[in-house]
Image: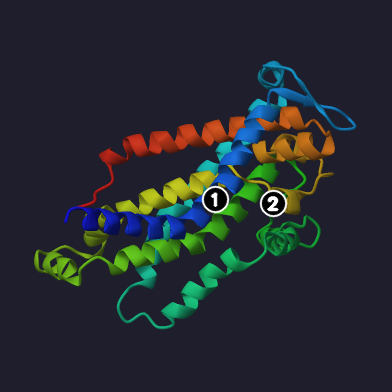
Amino acid sequence: MSSEPTRRIRREDGWAWLFIGPLMLGVVVFYFWPILRTLYNSFTEFGAFGGTRWTGLENYADLLSDAHVPRALLNTLIYTVIVLLGIPLSVYLAALLNRPGLRLAWFYRVMFFLPIVAMPAAIAMVWRMIYNSDFGLLNYALSLVGVDGPYWISSPGWALAAVSVVGLWSSLGFSIIILSGGLRAIPPELYEAASLDGAGPMRQFFSLTVPLLTPSIFFLTIITAINGFQLFDLLYALLGPNNPAMAQTQSLVYLFYEQAFAQNDKGYASAIAMLILLVIGVITLVQFRFQRRWVSYD
């Protein structure tokens, strides 16, 4: 009698592995194996005509002595912090878009979400025209109030800020959609009870809406931080490789691209890739460690 339940359990386990097997194979082939291969490559030097030579920690020693790495790391951190500032703005906008009786709310959501589905190259082309120092819309608007606008994307002091603003703007749509889902999960009875207790809209927002949205906000901080450290396509398309400000504005991923494909130093580029993985892992671990202090799942 006991063998029949055992066979049934094994049969169910077999079906489970049959369905998740292709997915697990894809994860191993396209995620775990590239990480392991990159880790191995970071200890090697690639020849000009192929082949590798084991160099040990030489690439990591070069990484510590490379003056471009701290600058690229700082630029990536600054960009990530600025993009993270879009999350509080997204909370406020999501609360506005989910007010009862708001007309054309669907239209506003679509407008905010459009940058997510647009190609980064197309977004960069539009913003290059806006930032153009001679006939751009931004400098024209500043000239109306007597301000002489700078060279936004070719000045080392302004280029990173210009890219960060575009990154913040393009991330709003995804954050608003996630937060809107969280807002719909909040029972309306809580707002009715708060109104009966005399809480106004601002008190309800800070004492009710924001605390109940902390799980969604935490999720967005993780995703936004990871995406921030992957800055490349927007930077490359907006500034261009021949931009005089690129040396002072490059990100870690751009530095990886420069070493791997422009300099053909794939071993050193692999070391940079492992540095990016390490930084993202540490930041994510810190976020999970401190989320207990401010995230409420009740």
Q: Quadrant of residue 146?
A: bottom right
Residue at image point 62% right, 36% down: 75
128 or 141, which lies in front?
128
Which element is circle 2 on?
helix
Say which quadrant the N terminus sits in: bottom left
Which element is circle 1 on?
helix
Residue at image point 46% right, 35% down: 283
Q: Which residue is mark 1?
A: 25
Picture layout, residue 65 above or below residue 149: above
Q: Which residue is mark 2?
A: 233
94 or 159, which lies in front?
94
Q: Position of residue 2 (x, y in %)?
A: 18, 53
Residue at image point 74% right, 40% down: 257
216 or 99, which lies in front?
216
The label shown at residue 73 is none
Q: Position of residue 246 (x, y in %)?
A: 76, 40
Q: Position of residue 155 (x, y in %)?
A: 75, 42
Q: Is residue 273 visible?
A: no
For badge 1, the amino acid type reads Leu
Residue at image point 40% right, 83% down: 103
Picture layout, residue 155 above or below residue 190: above
For badge 2, the amino acid type reads Asp
Q: Is residue 58 left or right of residue 51?
A: left
Q: How many marks?
A: 2
Q: Position of residue 145 (x, y in %)?
A: 65, 59
